[in-house]
Amino acid sequence: MDKAILDQILSLGYQLSPAMASALRIGVILVLAWLAMAFSHKLIRTFRIYISSSMHDGEEVQRAATLGRVFRYAASVIISLVAGILVLAELGISVAPILGAAGVVGLAVGFGAQSLVKDYFSGFFLLLENQIRLGDVVEAGGKSGMVEEITLRYVRMRNYDGHVHYVPNGSITAVTNMTRGFAQAVVDVGVAYRESVDQALEVMRTVGAELRADAAFAARILDDVEIVGVDSWGDSAVILRCRFKVVAIEQWTVRREFLRRLKYAFDAAGIEIPFPHLTVYPGQAKDGSSPALRLSMEGATQHPGGTQ
């Protein structure tokens, strides 16, 4: 009786030994995958902290953190995929048909979601190349505004009216960053044709110097006003141009304040700021004479000899 039970136990042990060995190997694979994932995450995090320690700009640090999350996610996906293939092989499941089916499914999904894939790739390079940062005022994808959020999928901007634009990264073919490093506040001013251009330019130079000397604007303006001169001849005005080199995102504030002060300075100097005029031309007869314009006033009676 005891010998029969022992034989059954030994037989069961022989039957379970391959399964136990396979389970052990699967456990080792999972443990190694977990260790590899933890090590890769730690390595990426350490490298990101090392890079961020030499950065003094908060936006640069945030961009490095975003890229670190992207690399950690990619490492997790790759390690999990390799571990899954090894586990399936230990279970006796052929991975070749699965990989073939996955390739066909991936191809179909790629055709159907190619715009989504394009968004992610474009977003990755936008972050990697530091083309856009939070707080920048940019024009991208046909929209413009201040950047409030950057992801691998889209860029969120808010314009001056408070409207929020979500621009997919795949639709961004060109980026115009208006607040990178420094900016130029370009000002065009029109004066009447009868005014002295030199006098008007001198007034503009004086107002620009006073603006830069003001304590409220001294930190915003990086250089003296640059008087460009006569830019063009308009229909009723001579267009004069100047510009200020200013701190990024301050160009609109400086431009508005300069125009406000210049209006008072032109008024004090008697320089006319032109406005549209309408000239009535009655025509000319063959003998060179021009017909008289007959005027009538409201409440008056028109007579052949005059108006009463």
Image: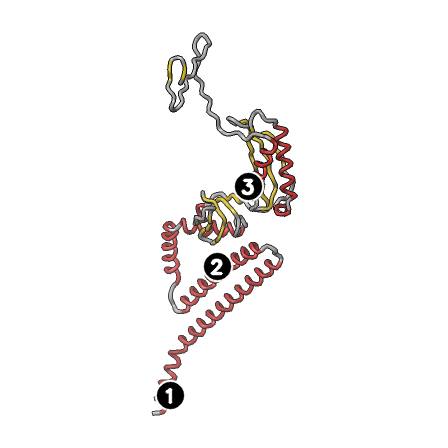
Q: Give the amino acid type for the residue marked by disc 1 in the picture.
A: Leu
Q: Residues within 10 Å of mark 2 (few under 14, many from 20)?
A: few
At numbered mark 1, what does the secondary structure look like: helix, strand or loop?
helix
Residue 113 at least partly seen: yes
Image-quadrant location for residue 298: top left
Residue 308: give x, y in percent of width and height. 40, 18
At numbered mark 2, what does the secondary structure look like: helix, strand or loop?
helix
Taking 196 as reference, is 8 above or below it? below
Drawn side of residue 271 relative to residue 156, left or right: right
Identity of the residue drawn at 65% across and 42% down: 223
Q: Residue furthest bottom?
A: 1
Identity of the residue drawn at 46% across and 24% down: 278
Q: Which mark is residue 6?
A: 1
Identity of the residue drawn at 54% across and 50% down: 130
Q: Which is nearer the eye, 270 or 153?
A: 270
Going from the N terminus, do you reach mark 1 or mark 3 first? 1
Q: Give the amino acid type for the residue marked by disc 3 in the picture.
A: Arg
Q: CA distance from mark 1 to mark 3?
A: 98 Å
Q: CA distance from mark 1 to mark 2?
A: 52 Å
Taking 219 as reference, is 71 above or below it? below
Q: CA distance from mark 2 to mark 3?
A: 48 Å
Q: Nearer the viewer, mark 1 or mark 2?
A: 2
Q: Which mark is residue 79?
A: none
Going from the N terminus, do you reach mark 1 or mark 2 first? 1
Drawn side of residue 107 relative to residue 235, left or right: left
Q: Are marks 1 and 2 in contact (CB under 8 Å)?
A: no
Identity of the residue drawn at 40% across and 66% down: 88
Residue identified by numbered label 3: 256
Residue identified by numbered label 2: 74
Q: Which is nearer the eye, 28 or 114?
A: 114
